[in-house]
Image: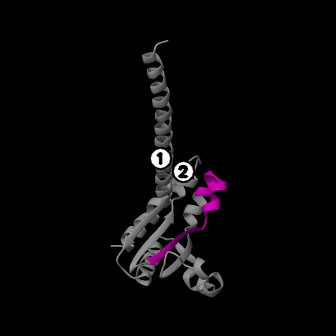
Amino acid sequence: MNHYTLHTSANWQFTSFYMIKVISLLLSSLLFISSAYAEELSVYKKSADRPLEEVYNAVYIELEQRNFYVIFEVNIGKNIARFKDKWGKEYNQNKLSGIRSMVFCNGWFANRVSNVDPNMLALCPLRLTVIEHSAQSHILFVRPSVAGKDSPALAILSEIEETVIDAIDAAME
């Protein structure tokens, strides 16, 4: 073995080591990006420069016009505000100025889902949350098609999802 062979061998080992590190870093980044993308797909989000109460009332009306009836409402922001002193620095770190949720259902859709896949009734009733941050409101809705991606009721769940998203979009116009 001559000096050139040793030097080349050492460079190859050095280069291989760093190539493996670079490939590992790229794969880790790809996994992180794909998981963030999957999370983004699982939650539909619509935003507007409007007050929370206005957005909340508008989406309530739009849902009911599509025969989704709100059966329960909760002002989460008001409820957790009671714990401000107890939670200290852990309280509302994102500085949300409001959090409200509504639970709603459409009996016809529930019946159709139950006829095809009763297990998907776990999605009934549906819910959405409206948050307010820096004078901007955001409606957040978990997509039923994500939970039911392998369900025989996927077509119905997708129809439900489209109808709710149409209501959200109309409320934000």
Compare marks 2 and 1 and give the one earlier in the sequence.
1
Q: Residue at x 46, y 39 (%)?
A: 22
Q: Which amino acid type is marked by label 1?
A: Ser
Q: Is residue 154 above or below residue 73?
A: above
Question: Mark 2: which secondary structure?
Answer: helix
In the image, the segment drawn in magenta is 113-132
Which residue is found at the position 46% from the left and 62% from the top?
44
Q: Between 53 and 145, which is closer to the camera in this rendering?
A: 53
Q: Quadrant of the C terminus?
A: bottom left
- Mark 1 element type: helix
Q: Position of residue 159 (x, y in %)?
A: 47, 57
Q: Position of residue 162 (x, y in %)?
A: 44, 60
- Kind of residue indicated by mark 2: Leu
Which labelled disc corresponds to residue 154?
Answer: 2
Q: In terms of depth relative to the viewer, which is nearer, 69 or 57?
A: 57
Tag on residue 29? 1
Q: Nearer the viewer, mark 2 or mark 1?
A: 1
Magenta stretch: includes residue 114: yes
